[in-house]
Image (cartoon, rainbow, N blue to C red):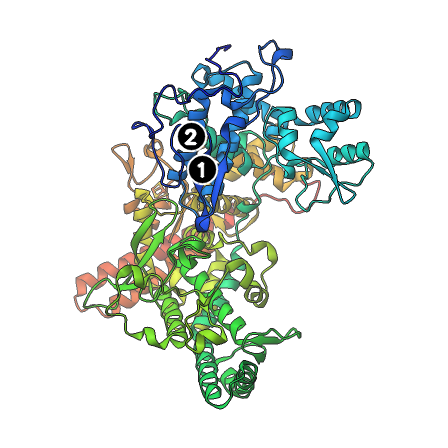
């Protein structure tokens, strides 16, 4: 592992790049954000809004390793490792080419920081070429990262203790790291990085270190809001980001120094294995929360939107009227406020708008006070939720927050067929395709976007005619914006942008959904939850009924509406094909939550049934003979069942008639729908599945089957052909028989008792 590379002493002027000219080498990828030439000593980057960022890679510090048996003393820099300068530069390009998010440069530099620290770790291991590393070295590295990430791998606390000790003995060291300004002590991140031999940022200085340095100077240290809080260790996502960055070292051109293998092929799995703090973002929305938010969103779109748009018209008319009467802006605004307050009670009564209107923009102080802008933001939150859920899209693909040149725009709905009322959505896919795509939409999405378009036209009536505009110009007419006085007065100013995190508070409060659910990723999760739970969860049925109050036909869509069934089947096909843009991760998470819910019901509920339920109860009974569950703890029993289920590779997929726990071809031999070594789920129905070992059901599923039987009876009544009628009635009778049989079995196979501590799992 001890490989010596050609080294150049710090400060030497040899041209780097293994003899290449300063032009960018042909085999190395390029990104237009790189402003410097290949051989330039400074890496210059074009940042957001034209701001340039400069990184002096050659001066990045690396640690001494003589004490560990290596040849290097204090003061080593990356400039002495020219092959790593090339690797670092190329890593940044690869990251920039990969990221398309808003802060792509920030994310790329974060990745580069991981790589620079990895170089430091390599030097400590006396490895000076990445190509010399073997898979087991990276395994050791992954272990070294636990639990505090670079703090653990580079022994940061110990090094900082040594720095404090040296600074206490040597005023020169102290003065090189610490300065006192205005009687406050500041630690220089650059100087400290040089002292410890790797990059360390001021955010990472532990409190104890700051206090120790301050004590040496006799002055208090400068308080930082972002001071490092250590204790919980790295989160899973921190491990994952680090592994993703290091994987890129295997994607380098062969002419550069690189890893010869991909160290962390499944970064998520490796991150979990690292024992990082579970990522807070992974919390799934509860179905009850989804119900509340969707219900309120539909209320805003279908009942309240007309009122909000009318208020914008009133506001605009009042401003124009006032402009001809007064010159002073304050008088114009006061007049508009007066007119809005007068008009509000009638508009509120007609459209069910909430609160007491205090004016157009300025928020009132009372809990009930509201403004036109706040009402617009609530309506936009509603549209965001509906479009986000129905299209399964990310927040920024819908909103286009900040300077992102995408998001829904006026005219983004395009007819998909000249003869029927069907539309496609022109939407930018941010993370996978990174381009504008067309997605089919359902009525809810269309209705929500139509509301936003009317709102935009109320702000900008001159945009009604868009026939002469190019697609690029059209896409600038964003829908998630709200007006100011000047916008409504027709001045050439940019409207304010809706921002989900800032503007959704009132909506969530009205829905009765807590802070913890106000996540921007909610909508893809919603989509996944609704997709996974759509047939079974009783609360989803309640949701369907709840939606009934809001909107006539698009109500029970998620469960019973035939067009939604078609949509669900379409989604199912897309899911099976694993098409791009599909939120696979969210679906898997929702599926795991769904599996837990089903297993819980299997162990505790009288309405859980089907062969899989009976098997699960048998497992637990058998386990209970060998394993003693403390006080018949349900969690322990569930954990045992879950591990059995995981080991066998079962995961539930919800069908109209029940859940199928089979997951792959290897289960085809035992599955009732299996043939030729494959599952044929397309043939599945209650008749086939009810006798399949992978099937579980519940009262809610049985009600769906009952509904199907009733639909068949209704169909039989309208059928004139006697033979056909008899066939339909026979199918209906058969369904009823199966339901009766399943209910009888449910009654016979009682759930396991977990009611009182001390009872056993029998
Ligand atoms: S028969 Fe039904 S439950 Fe069994 S594997 Fe096929 S779809 Fe799944």
Q: Name the residue under label 1.
A: 44
- In the image, farthest residue toward the front: 13
Q: Position of residue 601 (x, y in %)?
A: 53, 48
Q: Is residue 58 left or right of residue 432?
A: right
Q: Position of residue 147 (x, y in %)?
A: 62, 29
Badges 1 and 2: C-beta atoms under 8 Å apart? Answer: yes
Q: Is residue 31 left or right of residue 266?
A: left
Please tell me in which quarter of the rendered image ligand 1 is found.
top left
**Label 2: which secondary element:** loop
- In the image, farthest residue toward the bottom: 325
Vertical side of 458 occupied by 569: above or below: above
Q: Is residue 34 left or right of residue 272?
A: left
Q: Which part of the image, by quadrant, shows the C terminus?
A: top right
Q: What's the residue at 50%, 38% (across, down)? A: 616
When asked about the image quadrant of residue 653, the answer is top left
Q: What's the residue at 60%, 57% (across, down)? A: 515
Q: Mark 2 points at which residue?
A: 40
């Amino acid at each position: 592992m001890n490989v010596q590379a050609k080294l150049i002493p710090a400060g030497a002027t040899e041209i780097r790049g293994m003899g290449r000219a300063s032009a960018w080498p042909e085999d190395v990828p390029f990104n237009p954000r790189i402003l410097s030439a290949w051989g330039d000593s400074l890496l210059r980057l074009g940042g957001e809004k034209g701001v340039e960022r400069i990184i002096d890679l050659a001066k990045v510090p690396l640690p001494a390793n003589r004490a560990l048996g290596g040849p290097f003393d204090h003061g080593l820099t990356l400039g002495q490792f020219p092959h790593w300068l090339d690797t670092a530069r190329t890593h940044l390009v690869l990251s920039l080419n990969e990221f398309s998010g808003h802060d792509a440069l920030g994310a790329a530099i974060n990745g580069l920081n991981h790589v620079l620290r990895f170089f430091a770790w390599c030097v400590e291991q006396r490895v000076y070429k990445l190509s010399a590393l073997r898979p087991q070295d990276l395994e050791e590295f992954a272990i070294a990262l636990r639990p505090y990430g670079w703090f653990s791998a580079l022994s940061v606390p110990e090094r900082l203790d040594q720095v404090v000790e040296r600074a206490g003995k040597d005023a020169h060291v102290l003065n090189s790291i610490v300065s006192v300004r205005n009687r406050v002590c500041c630690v220089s991140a650059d100087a400290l990085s040089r002292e410890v031999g790797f990059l360390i940022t001021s955010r990472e200085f532990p409190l104890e270190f700051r206090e120790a340095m301050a004590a040496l100077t006799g002055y208090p240290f400068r308080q930082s809001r972002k001071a490092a809080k250590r204790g919980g260790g790295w989160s899973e996502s921190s491990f994952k980001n680090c592994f993703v960055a290091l994987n890129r070292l295997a994607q380098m051109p062969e002419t550069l120094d690189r890893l010869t293998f991909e160290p962390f092929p499944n970064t998520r799995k490796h991150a979990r294995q690292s024992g990082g703090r579970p990522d807070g973002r992974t919390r799934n929305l509860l179905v009850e929360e989804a119900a509340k938010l969707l219900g309120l969103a539909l209320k805003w779109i279908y009942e309240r939107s007309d009122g909000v748009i009318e208020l914008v018209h009133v506001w605009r008319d009042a401003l124009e009227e006032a402009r001809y009467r007064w010159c002073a802006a304050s008088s114009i605004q006061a007049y508009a406020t007066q007119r809005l307050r007068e008009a509000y009670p009638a508009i509120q009564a007609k459209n069910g708008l909430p609160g007491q209107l205090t004016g157009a923009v300025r928020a009132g102080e009372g809990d009930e006070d509201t403004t036109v802008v706040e009402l617009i933001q609530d309506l936009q939150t509603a549209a965001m939720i509906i479009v986000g859920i129905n299209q399964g899209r990310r927040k920024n693909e819908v909103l286009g927050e900040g300077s992102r040149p995408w998001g829904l725009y006026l005219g983004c709905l395009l007819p998909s067929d000249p003869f029927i009322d069907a539309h496609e959505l022109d939407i930018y896919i941010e993370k996978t395709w990174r381009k504008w795509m067309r997605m089919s939409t359902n009525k809810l999405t269309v209705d929500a976007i139509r509301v936003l378009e009317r709102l935009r036209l109320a702000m900008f009536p001159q945009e009604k005619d868009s026939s002469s505009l190019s697609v690029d110009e059209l896409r600038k007419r964003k829908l998630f914006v709200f007006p100011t006085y000047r916008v409504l007065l027709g001045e050439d100013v940019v409207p304010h942008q809706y921002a989900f995190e800032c503007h959704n508070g009132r909506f969530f409060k009205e829905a009765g959904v807590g802070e913890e659910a106000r996540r921007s990723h909610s909508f893809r999760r919603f989509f996944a939850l609704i997709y996974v739970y759509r047939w079974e969860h009783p609360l989803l049925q309640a949701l369907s009924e709840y939606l009934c109050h809001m909107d006539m036909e698009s109500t029970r869509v998620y469960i019973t509406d035939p067009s939604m069934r078609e949509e669900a089947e379409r989604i199912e096909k897309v899911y099976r094909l694993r098409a791009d843009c599909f939120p696979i991760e969210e679906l898997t998470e929702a599926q795991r939550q769904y599996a837990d819910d089903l297993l819980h019901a299997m162990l505790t509920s009288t309405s859980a049934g089907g062969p899989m339920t009976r098997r699960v109860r048998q497992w637990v009974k058998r386990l209970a003979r060998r394993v003693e569950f403390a006080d018949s703890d349900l969690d322990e029993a569930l954990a045992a069942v879950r591990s059995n289920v995981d080991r066998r590779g079962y995961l539930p997929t919800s069908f109209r008639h029940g859940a199928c726990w089979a997951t792959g071809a290897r289960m085809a031999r035992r599955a009732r729908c299996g043939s030729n070594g494959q599952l044929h789920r397309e043939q599945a129905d209650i008749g086939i599945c009810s006798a399949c070992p992978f099937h579980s059901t519940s009262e809610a599923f049985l009600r769906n089957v009952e509904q199907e039987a009733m639909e068949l009876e209704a169909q039989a009544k309208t059928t004139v052909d006697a033979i056909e009628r008899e066939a339909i009635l026979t199918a209906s009778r058969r369904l009823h028989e199966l339901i009766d049989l399943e209910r009888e079995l449910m009654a016979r196979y009682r759930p396991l008792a977990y009611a009182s501590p001390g009872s056993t799992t029998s």
